[in-house]
Image: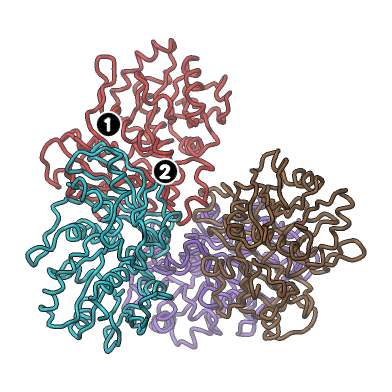
Chain colours: A purple, B brown, C red, D cyan
C-alpha cells in the first residue's frame, strides 16, 4: 500500500513535533514535508493533506490559502474552529459534522478545505459530556481545570512563574471562553446547512499547574433526567462510537476509561493511557449543587492536539475525503 | 504588662512550629511550654491556655483531658470541631458562637474548655461566603481547591507523588467533606443552646498541587437575591467585622483583599498578604451555571491554622475568656 | 525453554517494583514469589534465585540466611557489598570477580551465595572510569552528583524538603563514602583469594535534586598517562566488554553512549537510553585542575539498581552459576 | 541629609527590579529615574550615578556612552568586567582595585566611569577563596554549581526545560568560563597601572536546577601551605574585611557565615541570610583529591547581582568617589 504524503505546518513547535512523532511508523500516512511557522509556511508544499500545528496568529491566513490551493488542511489552531462551515471534529462524537465540508468547499471555491480539532482542554471534557448527554441530556456543566505546561507550547510558561505556584485564567481568560463555547458546537448538530449549538450551559475556570503533560479537570454536571450514580458510571463506561468499527489506527478502545479509585486520575500516572489517546475519568459522586461530579484527564499534546488532528485525518481517509 | 503563658501542643509539627514563630515578639502572649504529639502531650503543662497543633489521632483525648483539668484549649485539630457545644470560631465572622462555652463547661465540669478553628481549606472560603451571605444570602457554593503541600504536615506528601503531578481527593475525600460541612456550622447560628447550620449547599472537590504554601480555590456561588457584579465586588471589598474595633494584634485590615487582575491571586505572589492572615479574592465574573465565580487564596499554615488559633486566643483574651 | 523462577525480596519498594516490571516478558526468568521487607522476608521462598531490593536494615541477616539455605541471592542492598568474599559485580567490568564465590560458598557452607551490585550513584561513575583506567590509568577522580528522588526510595524525600531546594550530603554523607569506596573494589582485582582495591583516589560530594529519575554526575579525572581529548573520547566511545558476545537480554550496546552536545546529558531527556541500562556521557573537556572533565547520567532505579541486579543474574545464568 | 539620586538601567528585568526593591528606604540613595533595556536606555538620565542591570547585549555601548557623558556607572553586566582598567569590585575583598579608575577616566576622557560587579556564580565562590588565599594561598579550585532559575533573568528558563530535569553547562559553557576567570582578576592585584591575575587555577562545571533563588556550589581546594581542618574553618569564620569599619548599609556582618551541619547550606533555607547579602559556607571536610572540600550558597539576585552593585555604590560614596 502506498502511504499518503503528509505536510506538517508548525513543525518546530510542541504540537508539530508530536505530529511528526506520531507519524513515525504510521500504517497509512508518512511525513513528506515540514514547514515552520513563518509567513511562507506551506507555500508550494507537495502532499495529500496537511496537519497544521501553526500558532493562531499565522494559522488563519496560511491555512485558508492552502485550502484554496486545493489542499485538505487538518488544523489544531483555533482560528477557523468556530467558523460557520468548518467542522470542529472529534471522530468518536460528531463525524456527521463533516457534512459541512460541501458548503465550505463551495465558499472557498476549491476541492481543498479546513477541518479543525478542539482546544486541548475542551477535548477531554467533551467525551464524558457526550456520553451523558446522549443518555440523560446534560443541562449544565461546571468545570475547573488544572492544565499542563506543554499546553502553552514552547518556550511557553517561564519557570520563574510556575515554580511553587499556580497560574489562574490561562490566556487572560481566553482559555475559559474556549472551554465554554467549543463543546456547544461539537455537541450540537449540523442541520439545514448550519451548525446548531447544544443548549448546554458551561462555566469554566482554568489554571496552569506545574505538570509537564496531562490536563486534569474537575467537573460537575446537571442532568436533564434522573439517573443513579451507577447509571451515570455505566453511561461513561459503555460509551461506544460509530467509528469503533472503522478500526482507525490511533483510536483507543475504549476511548473513555473509567477509574474506580477516588484519587485517580492523576496526570503523571494516567496521561499515557491508550497511547495518550484515551480520556480517563474518575469515580462519579453526587454533587451537592448540581447532580454529579467527577474528574477527567487527557494528554493535552496527544489526544488534545497532535493525536486529535491525526485521528481526524484517519477518519477522513476511511471515508474517502482525503487521498482519493 | 505581664504576658499570658501559652503551652504549645504538637510543637514539632508544621502547625506547631508556626505557632511558636507567630508568638515570637507577641505583645500579649509568650510560649511557656511545648510538647510534641505523643500520648503524654500536655500532661502537667503549666500555662494560661494551650494552642494545639496536635494531629487528630491524638487530639481528641488529650485536649479533652486538658480542658477537664481546667485549661482553655484553642485547637487546630478536627476532632472537636463539629461537637454540639464546641465553637468553630473565626473571630471576624462568628464571635457570638463563644456563647456555647457556657454549656460546654457544664458538660466538661471544669472552667477549662475547647475552642476550635476550621480546616485550612475551609477558612479561606468562609470569608467571601460570609460577606456575600450577609448581603445577598448564598444558596449554593461550588468550590474546587488547589492546595499546598504544607497542608499535609511534615513529612506529608512524598516528593515522588507530587513531582510532575496533581493529587486529587485529599485525605481520600475527607477534605472534601470538611469543606462541605464546616462552613455550614460557621455561618450558622448559636440559638436556643444549639448550633443551627446555615442552609447553604456546598459541593467541594479538593486537590494537592506542587506549591509550598497557599491554598487556591475556584469558587462559584448562587445568590439568594439579585446582585450586579459591582455589588458583589463591593460586598467583598467592604466586608467589615465587629472585631475590627478590638484591634487584635494578628487581625489584618482589611481581612478580605480584593484583587482586580484576572490572573490573581497566585499562591507565591499573594500568600503573605496581611502577614499571611488576609484572604485574597480575585475579580468576580458571571458564572454561566450559578451566578458568580471568583478565586480566593489564603495562607494555609498561618490564616488556615496557627494564625487562626492565635487570633481566636486574642479575641478571647480581649473578651476576658482567657487569662483572667 | 523452561524459565528460571525468581523470588523478589522487598517487592513493594521502589527497587522491588522495578525488578518485577523488568521481569515482565523476560526471555529467561519469571517471577515466582514476592515478599515485602519485614523480618520474615523470603522465608521458605521457592525459587531458582532471589533478586533482593531489601533495605539495608533488614538485608544483612535475611540475605545471609537465604544463602545459607542454598539460594543464590543477587542483592541491591549495601549490607554485603564490601565483604571480603562477596563480588560487587558489574558484568561489563569485573565478571572475573565471580571467582570469589568459591571462597564465599565455603565460608557460608552452602551452595547458596550472595552477589551484590553497586550503589546507584556508583554504577554510572564506574563505566567511564573503567574505560579510561584500562587505557590510561586513572589516578584521581573528583565527582559531584545531582541525584534523583527515586534513589531515596518511597516515601523517601518529603516534598516540603525538596520544593525550590537542593539537599546536600545524601544520607548525611554516607552516600559520599559509598561513591568514594565502591569503585575501588569494582575496579580492583580478585587475586590470591582476596580483593585488591584499585589505587585510584576518589573525592565525592552528593546532592539530591528535584528530578524523578536519573542521576547526573559532574566528573573530573587525573590520568596516569598523557592523552589527548580525542583519545579520551575514543576510549569512552569504544569501550567494549567481554560480555558483549554473550548477548545478555538486558545488556545495552553500547553501554557507554557518548553525547557531543555540551548541554547533555540531561536527566529527563537521556535517562531512558538503552531501556535505562546505558550510561550517557557528555563531551570531554580539559580540566584546569585535573586533566579532563565530563558529565554522565544513568537511570538510578534501572541501571543503578533493579536492572543491575537482573543483568548480574543474566551473566551468572550464562556462566552456569545459577539455574543449573 | 539629601539622598543621592540613582538611575536604574534595565529596570524591568530581574536584576533591575531587585535594585529598585533594595533602594526602597535606603538611607543614602533614592531612585530618581528608571529605563528599560532598549537602545536609548539612559539617554539624558539625570542622576548622581547609575546602577545598570542591562543585558550584556546592550550594556557595552550604553554604559560607555553614559560614562563618557560624565555619569558614574555601577554595572552588573559582563561587558566591561574584564577590561584592563575597569574594577571588578567586591568591597570586602578588593576595594583597592578602585585605583584603576584614575586610568580609566583618562581613557574615557570624562569624570564618568564604569565599575562592575562579578557574575552571580563568581561572587559566592570568591569569598571563601579570598579567606583561604589570604591565610594559606589557594593553588587550585574545583567548583561544580547548582544555580537558581532567577540567574537566567525573565522569562529565562522555560518551565518545560527544567521540570523533572537539570540543565548542564549554563550559557553553553560561557558561565563556566566566567567562573574560571573572574576570580583571578578579583583576587589579583592592581599594580603598576595594570591588573595582575591571581595564579590560582580554577575548573568549573555549571548547572541550572529547579530552584527559584540561591546558587549552591560544591568546592574543593588545594592550598599552598599545610592547614588543619580547624584552621581552614577558622579562616572562613574569622574572615574580616577592611570595610567592616565603614558600616555600609548593605554589608552583612559577618559576610561569611559558617554552618556546621553537613546538610547545609540549602538554597531555600539559607539564601536570605544577612538580607541576602551573606555567603553561607558549610562544614569543611578533607578532599581525597585536592585538600579540602565544602559547599557555599549565595543569593544570586541580591549578593550576586543587585546587592553587589549597590554595595559597590555604598563603598564609593563613603570614599567620595560618587556624589561629591
Which of the numbered marks, if any, corresponds to residue D261? 2
Vertical placement of D29 versus B1: above or below? below
Vertical placement of D158 versus C185: above or below? below
Q: Chain of mark 2?
A: D
Residue at the farthest left position? D192
Q: Position of residue B144 (x, y in %)?
A: 65, 65
* Separation (CA) of disc 1 from disc 2: 49 Å
B183 to the left or right of C225 = right
Q: Position of residue A220 (x, y in %)?
A: 69, 66
Q: Which quarter of the image is occupied by the C terminus of chain B?
A: bottom right
Mark 1 surroundings: few (<14), some (14-19) or many (≥20) residues within 10 A: few
Q: Which quarter of the image is occupied by the N terminus of chain B?
A: bottom right
D222 to the left or right of B105 = left
Vertical placement of D217 versus B279: above or below? above
Instruction: Report the front residue among C56 and B308.
Output: B308
Which of the numbered marks, if any, corresponds to residue C245? 1
The quarter of the picture where residue B103 lies is bottom right
Which of the numbered marks, if any, corresponds to residue A91? none
Mark 2 surroundings: few (<14), some (14-19) or many (≥20) residues within 10 A: few
In the image, what residue occupies the spot 45% across and 26% down? C1
Dot 1: element: helix
Residue at the farthest front position? B1
In the image, what residue occupies the spot 61% across and 84% down? A194
Q: Position of residue D254 (x, y in %)?
A: 35, 56
On the question of residue B58 being in view, the answer is yes
In the image, what residue occupies the spot 70% across and 54% down? B76
Amino acid at each position: 500500500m502506498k502511504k499518503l504524503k503528509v505536510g506538517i505546518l508548525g513543525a518546530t513547535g510542541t504540537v508539530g513535533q508530536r505530529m511528526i512523532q506520531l507519524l513515525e511508523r504510521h500504517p497509512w500516512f508518512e511525513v513528506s514535508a515540514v514547514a515552520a511557522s513563518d509567513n511562507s509556511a506551506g507555500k508550494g508544499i507537495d502532499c495529500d493533506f496537511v496537519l497544521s500545528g501553526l500558532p493562531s496568529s499565522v494559522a488563519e491566513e496560511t491555512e485558508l490559502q492552502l485550502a484554496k490551493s486545493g489542499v485538505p488542511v487538518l488544523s489544531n489552531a483555533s482560528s477557523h474552529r468556530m467558523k460557520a462551515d468548518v467542522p470542529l471534529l472529534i471522530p468518536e462524537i460528531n463525524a456527521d459534522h463533516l457534512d459541512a465540508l460541501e458548503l465550505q468547499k463551495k465558499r472557498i471555491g476549491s476541492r481543498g478545505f479546513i477541518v479543525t480539532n478542539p482546544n486541548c482542554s475542551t477535548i477531554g471534557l467533551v467525551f464524558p459530556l457526550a456520553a451523558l448527554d446522549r443518555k440523560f441530556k446534560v443541562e449544565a456543566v461546571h468545570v475547573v481545570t488544572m492544565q499542563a505546561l506543554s499546553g502553552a507550547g514552547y518556550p511557553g510558561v517561564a519557570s520563574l512563574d510556575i515554580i511553587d505556584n499556580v497560574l489562574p485564567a490561562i490566556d487572560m481568560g481566553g482559555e475559559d471562553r474556549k472551554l465554554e463555547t467549543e463543546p456547544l458546537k461539537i455537541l450540537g448538530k449540523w442541520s439545514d446547512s448550519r451548525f446548531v449549538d447544544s443548549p448546554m450551559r458551561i462555566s469554566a475556570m482554568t489554571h496552569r499547574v506545574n505538570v509537564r503533560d496531562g490536563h486534569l479537570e474537575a467537573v460537575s454536571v446537571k442532568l436533564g433526567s434522573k439517573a443513579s450514580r451507577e447509571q451515570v458510571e455505566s453511561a461513561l463506561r459503555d460509551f461506544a462510537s460509530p467509528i469503533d468499527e472503522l478500526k482507525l489506527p490511533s483510536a483507543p478502545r475504549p476511548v473513555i476509561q473509567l477509574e474506580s479509585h477516588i484519587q485517580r486520575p492523576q496526570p503523571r500516572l494516567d496521561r499515557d493511557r491508550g497511547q495518550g489517546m484515551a480520556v480517563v475519568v474518575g469515580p462519579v459522586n453526587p454533587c451537592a449543587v448540581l447532580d454529579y461530579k467527577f474528574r477527567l484527564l487527557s494528554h493535552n499534546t496527544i489526544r488534545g492536539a497532535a493525536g486529535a488532528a491525526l485521528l481526524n485525518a484517519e477518519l477522513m481517509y476511511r471515508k474517502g475525503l482525503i487521498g482519493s
